[in-house]
Amino acid sequence: MTDSSSDCTLEEEYVLYKNRPQWRDVTPIQQDDGPNPVVAIAYSEQFRDVYDYFRAVLRSGEKSERVLELTNDAAQLNPANYTVWQYRRDVLHHLNSNLTEELDYIGETIREHPKNYQVWHHRRVIVEWMKDASNELQFTDQVLSLDSKNYHAWQHRQWVVATFKLFDAELQYVNNLLVKDVRNNSAWNQRHFVIVHTTGFTPEIIQRELEFTASKIKDVVNNESAWNYLRGVLCHTESGNITSEDFILDFCQELYDMGCRSPYLLAFTIDICEEFLELGVSSEAYPIQKALQLCEDLAVEHDKIRKEYWKFISRKLSQNVSCKTDVNSSS
Amino acid sequence: MAKLLPENRRSYAEIESLKFDNEGQPTASSLEQEEVERSVLTQFDLFEKRAEVDEDCPLLLRQKHANVLKKSLTHLPQSFQCLDSSRPWLVYWALHSLALLEEQLEEEDYTKITGFLAKCQSPNGGFGGGPGQIPHLACTYAAVNALCTIGTKEAFNVINRESLVKFLWSVRQPDGSFIMHQNGEVDVRGAYCALSVSKLTNIYTPELFEGTAEWIVRCQSYEGGFSACPGMEAHGGYSFCGLAALFMLGKDHLCDMKAFMRWIVNRQMRLEGGFQGRTNKLVDACYSFWQGGAFIFLHNILYKENKSIVNSDRWLFNQEALQEYILICCQQPSGGLIDKPGKLRDVYHACYALSGLSVAQHTSLIKKYIVGSPSNLLAPIHPMYNITFDAAVKAMKYYENHPIPPSGTP
Ligand SMILES: [Zn+2]
């Protein structure tokens, strides 16, 4: 339909718009940069020509098949031109164009420019118009298979999955990605997203997720993604406390006793101690003195780059301790 | 003989000892990380050898960067066609970088730039990516920042504040979020850009941002950072936008600051010293500002809460390590700054590497930490807008005397 310029045989005979008889009725409009252009781009002749005609149709408001082709040429020359995409959608709408073809077309463009905001937004609008997302999981999977952390692809996928209720196989999809790369934080984030929108974090699901995450942490203790997800699960417990699950208290204790000094484990342990202090629970395994010692260990040995932070946390804990002591002694 | 290192400076041996441990489980993420660490270590190694003979290093190549930036303001090669819808950005990145370097342009250059940005302003308010393009919130932010960086009456007067208000209302959504342009995408950048320009030019009204803080809070992920929109992964660029916007709205208490702090402090890479944008991703110099800048808000928020435990001399990240990463790993010898070793220079990374460097150098207007030559010192920035502090003060003073235009379509 519109992708003539990407067709090799036609590209060889590319004719500038100003030399096309079928465009003779349109007067091109040059870009008005004013008398003293700055950040002046050395446009190719083709770029200048296409955009001179695009400006002309933007002004005349023409919406036709030939304009659709013009917007294709303009978009291929600069896929970030949101004015072009916006006008292209006006034309598509006006012509009642075949959206399946448009979806194929934008798919090609996204594959060439997978990190561009405009092309993903265009796809989203087309899918919205079609009210049909049957290609979207496969499409985003293809993009993610080349770059498993492409933010735009994930954002599109979340929108599709939530809007069209395509959750059925999504947790399995996440699982597969985590098998490939357990450090893929985007996959962990998607896991949280899926559960929030499907089963929710019920006590059973929380238990399942804690066990799943703990096993992943055991495999790779310095995997921050898994530790962050662990907190993400625990904030859904009834109390929202990270100390609410004995399983996790034991898990951390066990790792520490085995000699693990991952900064993420130590940080987590500090938070457990702090929470016990705040809740007024005296814990043998997690006394506040342990937290203070771990802050010191992190600052001078295990996580030196964050020294300022650990010193701050240490001061905060000490202040909390003295507040508690004051309250206790005055009551 | 071992040389005495200034406070918090790290030796090569120490940096090398921080290499990534893949725990016998190599994956795509760990392989990429190890590759970057190798290239970064090469730079640190070369540097340590140079440092033995050169007292002044690491040295910020001010003049070389300035030359590259000045050139980019006039003529750009054909390869920039893909940035033809970001021309106000190209202007802002270069102008702000030059302002950080305290490089002056000729008066007539400022007049030319002002005239060009005026051409990018839409008759319906706001600025587009180039003359004749429809207005876009991000381009509007860039153009307003560029004009305020120029800071002449002529530049201030380019901004049509009446039509700007109308444009902002036209992109505001019922839930308080903002689309980037007519029928465009929604994300947290929109809210930040809208707030930044309205605070800077004194057109802010609470009605325009009703519900915005509540919408932004929904973008805080379980990791603690903010994402583009609710549900997505915490990300450095969006986190800056989210926190800066909440701060400007005076509603930072609505988000979980403890979680935010935990997330952002962990974005500083232990070996590289620079910041990554997301968990388990790679270091990138542009996050020196997106993450580094957010620490200024964090510091202020913590100080408000409980000043007795805040060290007012330091941000909560390692300011020396960040400076080392930028100065040693991200300068191109011919001028210009890069994302990470092996990448090509671009003005975007120059702007955000230098902005981050400035943040790392200035804890307050009096307390400074300068790694390397004293000549490396940059002008301080205003974290809400990321223009220089002086430029922000001057702009706010200028617009203070202009009444807030009527809101048009509440
Ligand atoms: Zn970058």
Image (cartoon, helix red, strand yellow):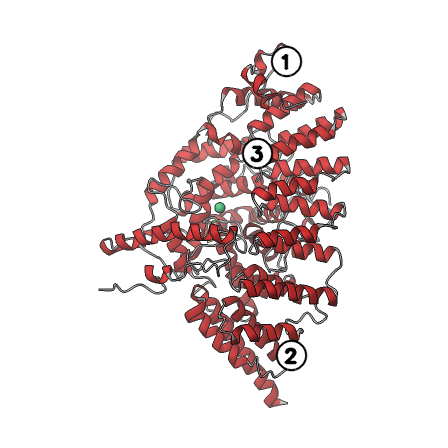
- Whichever of labels 1 and 2 marks the residue nearer the N terminus, that label is 1
Disc 2 target residue? A279
Say if labels 3 and 2 share a chain. Answer: yes
Q: Which of pointers 3 and 1 lies earlier in the amino acid sequence?
A: 1
Q: Are marks 1 and 2 in contact (CB under 8 Å)?
A: no
Between disc 3 and disc 2, the foreground one is 3
Q: How many numbered marks, from 0 up?
A: 3
One can see residue B245 in this view = no
Sooner in the amino-acid sequence: mark 3 or mark 2: 3
Mark 3 falls within which chain? A
Q: Compute the Cα span from label 1 to label 2.
A: 77 Å
Image location (x, y in percent) of residue B95: 44, 41
Q: What residue does disc 3 label?
A: A112
In the figure, is residue B298 to the left or right of A189? Answer: left
Identify which amino acid the numbered label 2 is placed on: Leu
Query: Which residue is tagged 1?
Result: A23
- Marks 3 and 1 on same chain: yes
Residue A144 placement (x, y as % from top left): 60, 44
Distance (Cα) linking label 3 and label 1 = 29 Å
Tell which subunit mark 1 falls on: A
Dot 3 crowding, Cα within 10 Å, few <14, some 14–19, many 20+: few
Label 2 secondary element: helix
Q: Amino acid at mark 1?
A: Trp
Which residue is nearer to you in this view: B363 or B161? B363
Q: Position of residue B289 (x, y in %)?
A: 48, 51
Of badges 1 and 2, nearer the viewer stands 2
